[in-house]
Each structure stands twice: as structure tokens, then as C-alpha cells.
Image (cartoon, rainbow, N blue to C red):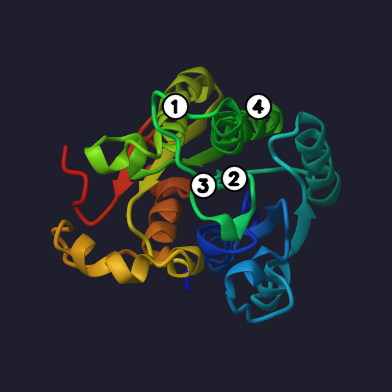
């Protein structure tokens, strides 16, 4: 395999399981040293996701790369600043930032299921929690990550949004807070790209649709996959590797002239 990211250092937030883990492992496979962040580095256990080593950082080390796991809440500026200090102390530089932390999360915990947040009735607490997890976390990490990237005048930032931030439909209105948060991530990406372009920093966004992850399986999405597939022109659900390969494009020299863009990785589910 071509180690096109050899010598690069990447940070992936929310990488203890699921899509974040897939991004972290894929970047390591193509040569990057990877910092694994999660609010709970053992979160794979919550969804019975099997690792090939005790932790995701250990999985990366098995691939011959350097890796550290940093447990931190990326909605906290103090914890974010502390995490970036640890990264720079350990590795000396940061080349790639993948802001994956977030999701349509329930403050009651992973087994409570997605919260219901209708546009006219969402509680302030649920709305704030989801906005913080998805938008605030992205902004705080981008602000902290842009400091060393500006100094070295290079970097690649990839923010993870969702098809929910690109379109709306009657069945989606009960997830208003998540939809709005991801739409905001997409537009924040555009704004940041305009600011950081002169520093040779690319900022882009990926918007996954229906992806088979351990959480999706635990939430029972396998049961509705048959109906979903009818709405997907490519005729199948996505897998974490499908998204990871697009992230690869956005953090390598293949995308050197791409910035401020949002790529929908959805099998054609979102067509515009």
C-alpha cells in the first residue's frame, strides 16, 4: 500500500468506535501517525464493536504507526486546548484534523436512543446538548487546530456533517436540532475555508448518509434497511470504509485544489 501520509500527524475526534475509528485506522493504513480522541476511549463496548486490540490506539500501533489516545470532552475549550498541547508536545506538529465527534445523541446516554426535537417544541436542554456535541465541538477543535497549521502554513481539516444537514423531509422534522447543527457545520466549513486558504490550509466537509456502523445496528437500523435501500440509487447501505476513502481524498494531495466543499457520500440518496 502507498504510504501517501508518511510523516503526517492526524487527529480524529470521536474515534473510539464507529466511523471515527474507521477514519483513524484508514489514515494509519496510508502512513499517518494518529491521535485518537473520544469522550470515552472504551465507547466501542457500548455497542459491542469488536476491536483487534485493547484500544483503537493499540490497533494503530499494530499497523506500525505512532498513536496515543486522549480522553477529552471536545465541547470544553479547556479540555480541547489541553488535548492540542499534548499532541504538539508529543508529535511536534499537526497536519490533519478530522472533526468526527457528534451525532444525534441523547443526554440520557447511548442506550436511550436518538432524542426527539421538533422545531416548535424542542427543549432547550436537548437542543443545546446536540448543538454543543456537533457544532461547538467542531468550532473549538478547528480554532485550536488552526493555530499550529497557520504557523506551519499547511494543513487539512475535514469536518463530518450529515445528509441531515443538506435536505429536509417530513420524516426528519423530529430531529430538528441534529439537522440544524449539521447544516451549521457545513456552512462553518465554508467560512473557515475562506479564512484559512491564504495559509495553504484546506477545509472541507463530508456528509454521510445511511451507514452500517455498530451504533446503527444497535439502534435497529438493520430492520429498516430494506426500505431505505429502495431510496438509494446505488442499491445498498454504506459502510465506514466508503466514507474513510473520501476522507483520504480530502487529506492527501489529491484534493490540493479543493476547499470549502461538502461532499455527500450517500449512494445517491441526496441528489442535488
Q: Residue at x 47, y 50 (%)?
A: 252
Distance between the alpha carbons at the discs numbered 4 and 2: 13 Å
Q: Is residue 94 left or right of residue 233?
A: right
Whether residue 187 can be seen here:
yes
**What residue did someone put label 1 on?**
121
SS category of the residue bearing label 1: loop
Horizontal and vertical percent for residue 37? 70, 52
Q: Which mark is residue 218?
A: none
SS category of the residue bearing label 3: loop
The first of marks 3 and 2 along the sequence is 2
4 vs 2, front mark = 4
Q: Which residue is drawn at 42% across and 39% down?
A: 205
The first of marks 4 and 2 along the sequence is 2
Distance between the alpha carbons at the discs numbered 3 and 4: 20 Å
Circles 3 and 2: CB distance less than 8 Å?
A: no
1 vs 4, front mark = 1
The first of marks 1 and 4 along the sequence is 1
Q: Which mark is residue 103?
A: 3
Horizontal and vertical percent for residue 165? 36, 35
**What residue did someone put label 4 on?**
143
**10 Å crowding of disc 4: few (<14), some (14-19), many (20+):** some
Q: Residue at x 65, y 56 (%)?
A: 7
**What residue did someone put label 2 on?**
96
**10 Å crowding of disc 1: few (<14), some (14-19), many (20+):** few
Of residues 18 and 23, the one drawn nearer to the viewer in this rendering: 18
Amino acid at each position: 500500500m502507498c504510504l501517501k501520509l508518511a510523516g503526517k500527524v492526524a487527529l480524529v475526534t470521536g474515534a473510539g468506535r464507529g466511523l471515527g475509528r474507521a477514519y483513524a485506522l484508514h489514515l494509519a493504513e496510508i502512513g499517518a501517525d494518529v491521535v485518537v480522541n473520544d469522550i470515552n476511549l472504551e465507547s466501542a463496548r457500548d455497542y459491542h464493536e469488536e476491536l483487534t486490540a485493547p484500544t483503537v490506539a493499540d490497533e494503530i500501533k499494530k499497523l506500525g504507526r505512532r498513536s496515543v489516545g486522549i480522553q477529552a470532552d471536545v465541547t470544553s475549550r479547556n479540555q480541547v486546548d489541553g488535548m492540542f498541547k499534548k499532541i504538539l508536545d508529543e508529535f511536534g506538529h499537526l497536519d490533519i484534523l478530522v472533526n468526527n465527534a457528534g451525532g444525534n445523541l441523547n443526554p440520557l446516554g447511548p442506550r436511550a436512543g436518538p432524542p426527539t426535537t421538533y422545531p416548535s417544541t424542542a427543549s432547550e436542554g436537548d437542543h443545546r446538548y446536540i448543538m454543543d456535541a456537533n457544532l461547538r465541538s467542531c468550532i473549538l477543535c478547528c480554532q485550536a487546530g488552526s493555530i499550529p497549521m497557520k504557523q506551519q502554513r499547511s494543513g487539512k481539516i475535514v469536518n463530518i456533517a450529515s445528509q441531515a444537514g443538506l435536505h429536509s423531509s417530513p420524516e426528519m422534522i423530529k430531529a430538528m436540532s441534529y439537522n440544524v447543527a449539521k447544516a451549521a457545520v457545513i456552512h462553518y466549513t465554508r467560512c473557515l475555508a475562506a479564512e484559512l486558504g491564504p495559509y495553504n490550509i484546506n477545509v472541507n466537509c463530508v456528509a454521510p448518509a445511511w451507514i452500517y456502523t455498530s451504533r446503527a445496528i444497535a439502534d435497529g437500523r438493520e430492520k429498516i434497511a430494506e426500505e431505505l435501500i429502495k431510496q438509494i440509487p446505488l442499491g445498498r447501505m454504506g459502510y465506514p470504509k466508503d466514507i474513510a476513502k473520501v476522507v483520504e481524498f480530502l487529506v492527501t494531495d489529491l484534493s490540493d485544489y479543493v476547499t470549502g466543499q461538502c461532499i455527500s457520500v450517500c449512494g445517491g440518496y441526496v441528489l442535488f
